[in-house]
Image (cartoon, grey):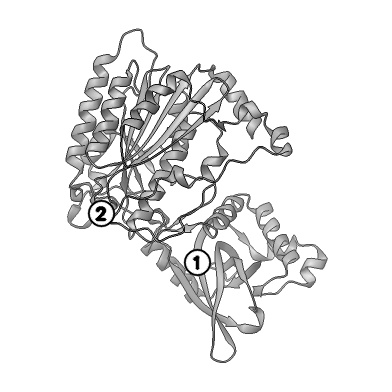
Amino acid sequence: MVAIIRCTRDETEYLKWQERLFPPSGRHEWTWTTTRPAKFWTKGKHITLVATPDRYGLLRVTRLGYTRRLRLAADLQQKLEVSHVALLPEPAALEKIIALLAARNRMHLVEEGQQTEATGKALLAALIELQPGADDVIGRLNAATTGYTVRSEAGQALATQRDAVLGIGRMAGMSIPQLARWDPPAEELYDDRPPPAYLDLLSTAESPSADADQAAPQHDIAIEDHHIGRDAEIFQGLFGQLTGHIAWRQFRQADQELLIANVNRTAVEGNSGADLLYYHQSRGSLILVQYKKLNKVGGYYYPDSDRNLAGELQRMQDVDAFAAGLRQPGDDHRLHPDPSWIKVCPPEGLIPQVDVMVPGMYFSRQHFQHLRGDPRLRDGRDEALRFGYSNVPSYLDNTMFTRLVETGMIGTTGVSTELVRQQIMQSVREGRLLTAGVLTGKEPPQSARNSARRRRR
């Protein structure tokens, strides 16, 4: 169902205040409670067009939200809770949206309140026609309202694993839709025990439908494969040496195999951090990503308050130096040849059921250390150093980072499986949450990979 809320100026200022207090980068799920005449809000939950007045008093749809009814208030007023409020990339005049409706839909339009199913669909279609960027907001809103609510640090650990698994699939250049299809845990997660492995929660893989086959040939879609290839046996054996909470899955696409593993052997409350390790065997290329979280309130990461950071940076520096010693003059060119990266990202409020990674900022170790000396980042209280979307001058996002890894523009050259083994074991010894991926097999040229990607769209 779809609804319309027309805000007063005071309500608009309240929304702006909440958005300043809890910026989107913080992923804090704040809610707005209001009241409206009960006769226009009789049932259901609704994607809501939030219309606010501009300086001239003209109503524009500036936000979308998700509204549900609470209890009746006095004087036949319905109490409403609006959650997941998201700004549109560009506002759309409400009268222009209504003008695009067919006559039959305008006949049933409710000025403010819930709409009929047909009129609601027509309103969303008109909004997207005027502002195509609204389509992405609607998609994220639908995903957020059907996801798994994160209530603990164990839930955050599960969200981090999921993000790393999806990232590895993208780095490998494989289309693996089943990585986003999972069954949330039925029981409450507790911080005094290791979190469940995300790979253990993946839904049973379904065979491609006829429509899917027409959209993308089966060989373009990675399929789960329980027959381990000879090259991948080395890495499967390595994970098999470990004990504890370990899960792995194998996927095959064309001549390549991708092994992904979750290793969670430490209780969440004793966990020292989260690592993503990705190794492309034919390139001898290693990528190591360490996760850092922005604050829930404010949306900043404060390096000087992170007691683990010094040791982590030393580890990254040692790995980078070791990998540099393996490079040879005839190796493939890299825009950045070191393995170590940091992803700074917000904590998750909800884990969706769609192939969407947690937004974040990626920095190479050198870039991160350089930014620590940048005066522009000392804009916190008492000139505290902090990293946030509002003050970091440049970074790589999910799309740029995973694409650069996939095309071989970043990552090491000439790294053997021994260094990979060392880093896996070090992450385990340090009690870190590890998600590792290893790609083996013959690599097709980039032109062939690009063609396959276009066929999958």
Which residue extends farthest top? 330
Residue at mark 2: 269
Q: Residues within 10 Å of mark 1 (few under 14, many from 20)?
A: many
Q: Is residue 180 above or below residue 412?
A: below
Comparing 346 with 22, the one in front is 346
Residue at mark 1: 83
The Cα atoms of the two marked residues, 1 and 2, are separated by 30 Å
Of callouts 1 and 2, which one flags the residue occurring earlier in the amino acid sequence? 1
Image quadrant occupied by the N terminus: bottom right
Residue 295, by quadrant, is bottom left
Q: Residue at x 55, y 41 (%)?
A: 178
Q: Is residue 131 visible?
A: yes
Image quadrant occupied by the C terminus: top right
Check whether the beta carbons of the residues at disc 1 and disc 2 lie within 8 A of each other: no
User: Which label sits on residue 266?
Assistant: none
Q: Is residue 410 visible?
A: no
Q: Is residue 134 above or below residue 434?
A: below
Residue 456, by quadrant, is top right
